[in-house]
Image (tube, coloured by chain):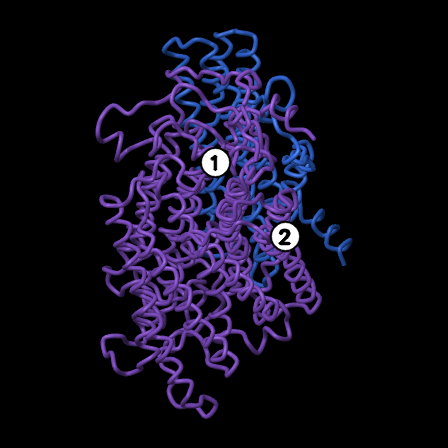
Chain colours: A purple, B blue
Amino acid sequence: MVDVPYGATAGIPPAEVEEVELYHPKSWWTQYVFSQDAKVIAIQYSLTAAAIGLVALVLSWLMRLQLGFPGTFSFIDASQYLQFITMHGMIMVVYLLTALFLGGFGNYLIPLMVGARDMVFPYVNMLSYWIYLLAVLVLASTFFVPGGPTGAGWTLYPPQAILSGTPGQDWGIVLMLVSLILFIIGFTMGGLNYVVTVLQARARGMTLMRMPLTVWGIFTATVMALLAFPALFVASVMMLFDRLLGTSFFMPALVEMGQQMNYGGGSPILFQHLFWFFGHPEVYIVALPAFGIVSDLISTHARKNIFGYRMMVWAIVGIGALSFVVWAHHMYVSGMHPKFGFFFATTTLIIAIPTAIKVYNWVLTLWRGDIHLTVPMLFALGFIVTFVNGGLTGLFLGNVVVDVPLSDTMFVVAHFHMVMGVAPIMVVMGAIYHWYPKVTGRMLDDWLGKFHFWVTFLGSYLIFFPMHYLGLLGIPRRYHDLGEAAFIPSSAHTLNAFITVAALIVGFAQMVFLFNLVWSLFRGRPSGGNPWRATTLEWQTPHTPPRHGNWGKELPVVYRWAYDYSVPGAAQDFIPQNQPPATQAVQGAAP
Amino acid sequence: MSAILLFMAVIALIVGWWLAQQRLTAKPWLEEGAIGDFPGTGAMALPAAKIGLGVFLAVAGSLFALFISAYYMRMNMVDWRALPVPRLLWLNTGVLVLSSVALQWAHVGARRNDMDRVIVGLCAGGASAVTFLVGQVLAWQQLSVAGYFVTSNPANTFFYLMTAAHGLHLMGGLVALGRTTAKVWHGAEMTQVRLSVELCAIYWHFLLLVWLVLLGLLTGWTDDFVDICRRLLN
C-alpha cells in the first residue's frame, strides 16, 4: 500500500456559511423540548416511538400468553384479545416503524448525510413531532376510555369496525381514527421537510448519485408516504362520518341485535380499496429505508464498496413505483373480477425482480469482503436472511389460488411478521448499534449487543417458523381460543405454547437492549468521531455528537461517492466523501 | 380507483422527467473529484419554499383525487340520488376566479416592484376568498333548508364532505395570505414578500383548479366524459 499524500490544492475551498442563516435556541426549553434542531427532533421521535412500541410489545406477550395457554389467564377475555391484536398491529406498523424510520432516522441522518445544517423548514419539522406526540397520546388514551380501545383489527374493516359487536365501539374507534388523522397531518409536515431537504440542501458536490443509499431509501419512502397516506386519511375521515353522523359511505343496510339500522347502500369494499391503497405502499415505506440502511451497514462493515450502486438506486425507485399498483392482492378473498386478480398477482410477482436484485447485490457486496462481525453487521446479515425467508412466502400469498386457502390463517401472520416485522426491526437494531456512537459519543456494549442479537435472531425464527406450519394446518388468525376442532391436532397446541415461551424470551432480550442503551450512555466506551471508519459525511463532523448546525463554520464539499472502501493505493481502507482527490498521488501511483 | 391512478400516473411522469435529468446512469465510483469546475449539487434553482409548496400540492392533489375515486365508486350503488346543485355555486365560482385573478395581479405587481398593486391585489384576493367561503356556507344552508341533509343520501354527504375539504384548504391558504398581507402592511421590503405573494398565487390557482374539477363532478358534467372513458376501457 502506498502512502498517499493528499494535495491540499486539489480541492475547491468549502463555502463558508454565515451564522445568521441558522436559528439558534435561546433557552433550555427551545434547545431540548421545543427544539427546531432536526437531531433533537429525531431523538424525540425515536423515544416516543420506542415508548409506544414497548406498549405494543407487552400487548404481544399478552396475546401469546392467551394463545399458548388458553384459559389460564382469566383476565384476558375475547374482547380484550381483539383489542390487543388491533393495537399491537396499528402501533407497530404506523406509530413505531413508520415514525422511527422516517421521523427518527430520517431526521437524524438526512441533514448529516447530505451535508446540510438542518432541515429546510425547521419550525414545521418541530410541529411535525408535536402533532405526532399528540397522535400517540390520543391513541394511548383509548386504553382508558369507556369500552377500551377498538378491537376491529389493524385493518379496521367496516362494517364490523363500527358495530356494537366489536369492542371499543363507543370511543375506541373514534379516537383511533382521530389519532390516525393527526398522525398523517404530522407526518406530512415532516415529510415535506425530508423531501425538500434532499432536493435542495445537499452540500456542494453531493449529486444524487453520490448520496448514500440510506438517504435514497428514506427519500423514496417519504415520497411514497406523502402520496399514500392521504388514502388512509380519506378512509379515516369517511369512516368517522359513518360512525359519528350516521352517513353510509361504507355501511350497507344492516340488522343489528334485531334492529334495522339507519345505514344503507354503502360499500365495505370501497374502504378496503382506500385502506390498501395506503396499506401496500406502507409495507415499502417501512422496507425501503431498511433496504437503504442495510446497504450502508454491509458496505461499511465488510469494508467494500456496495455492489451495483446504480442498480440499487434504480431498484429503490422501481419498487417505490410498483408498490402503488399491487394493493388489491390484499383483497383476493373480498371477491373481484378474475382479470383483476390476474393483474394484481402479476404486478405483485414483478416486484420480486427489483427486490431480488437488491438481495443479490447485498450478497455480492459481502462476497470476498473483509467482513467484521460487529453487532450492526450481525443484524444486517440477520435482516438479509429474514427478508429472503419472508419474501419467499410472499410469492405463495401473491398467487390467487394459493392465497385463497391460506387467507386469514397463521401463515399470513408468519409471512408479514417475517417480512415487515422482524426484518425491519433487525435493521432498526443494527442502525441503532451503528449510529449510537454518533448520537451519544459512546459505544454500546458489544457483549450485551451480541447477546441481544443472537437471542432476537434465533428466537424470532423459533416464533415464526412454526407459525407457518400452524397456518398450513389451517389454524385461523384473530381467534381468542381455538377450542376443540377435528382438524387441529394436539401437537398444534403444544407448538403454540412453545411459540409463547420463545416470544417471552425474545421480549426479555429487548429489555437487555434497553438496559444497554441506558447503561452505555453513561458508562460506554468513548467512541471518537468515526469508530467504524466510515466514509459518509455524518462521521466527518467536527464534533461528536454533532452540535447545532452540524458542521461548524464551513460546510463540507463532497468529492466522491459514499462507498470508497479498500480503494487500491489509498493510505487507509476508507476515503471520506469530503476528502479531496489526490491528484499528485494518482499521477505518482499510476503504473 | 381510476382517478387516483390517473393522478399517480401524472406524478410518475413528473418524477420520471425530473429523474431523467439527474444523471441516474452516472458511474459515481469513477467520478472522483469535483464534477465540473465548481461542484454543484444538482439542486434546482428554485427556492426551497416553492418546491415545498409543489410537494404539498402533490399531497393535496392526491387527497382530492382519492375523494373523487371514492365518489365514483360509491356513485354506482343503487341508492345514489344526485342532488340539485344550488345556483349560488356559479356565483361562488366566479368569486373564486376573481380571487385567483387578484392574487395573480398582486404577483405581477410584486415582480414589478409596485407595492400599491401588491396591497390591493392581496386584499382583493383575500376578501373575495372569504366571500367564496361565506357563499359556500350559504349554499350548504340552502341545501339543508331544501331537505338535502348530510345523512339523507351519499350524494349529499359527498357534496358536504368535498366542499368542506376544499374550504378547509382555502382557510389554510388564508392564514398564509393573512401573514403576507400583514407583513406588507407593516412596511416590509418587496424582496421579503415577493416569494410569499407568488406562493399564495400558485396555491390559489391550484385550489381554483380543484374547485373546477369538483364542480364538474358535483354538477354531473364529468359524467359523460367518464362514460366515454369507461367505454374506451371496455
Q: Quadrant of residue A67?
A: bottom left
- List x then y, in percent, for residue A586: 63, 26
Tell me the subunit letter for badge 1: A
- List x then y, in percent, for residue A197: 49, 31
Q: CA distance from mark 2 to mark 1?
A: 22 Å
Q: Quadrant of residue A484?
A: bottom left
Residue denoted by label 1 = A192
Other residues around mark 1 within 10 Å, as few (<14) / some (14–19) / many (≥20): many
With A498 as the anchor, is B31 left or right in this view? right
Q: Residue at x 41, y 66 (%)?
A: A153
Tell me the subunit letter for badge 2: A
Residue B220 can be seen in this image: no
- List x then y, in percent, for residue A120: 45, 28
Q: Which mark is residue B44?
A: none
Three-letter amino acid code at the position of disc 1:
Leu
Q: Quadrant of residue A69?
A: bottom left
Q: Residue at x 51, y 53 (%)?
A: A287
Q: Secondary structure at mark 1?
A: helix
With B85 as the anchor, is B221 left or right in this view? right
Q: Which mark is residue A322?
A: 2
Disc with the residue nearer the chain's start (2 vs 1): 1
Three-letter amino acid code at the position of disc 2:
Leu
Say above or below: A123 vs A52: above
Q: Residue at x 55, y 27 (%)?
A: A4
Give the total number of marks visible in the rendering.
2
Q: Secondary structure at mark 2?
A: helix
Q: Residue at x 62, y 56 (%)?
A: A360
With A586 as the anchor, is A500 left or right in this view? left
Residue A372 can be seen in this image: yes
Q: Are marks 2 and 1 on the same chain?
A: yes
With A288 as the anchor, is A337 left or right in this view? right
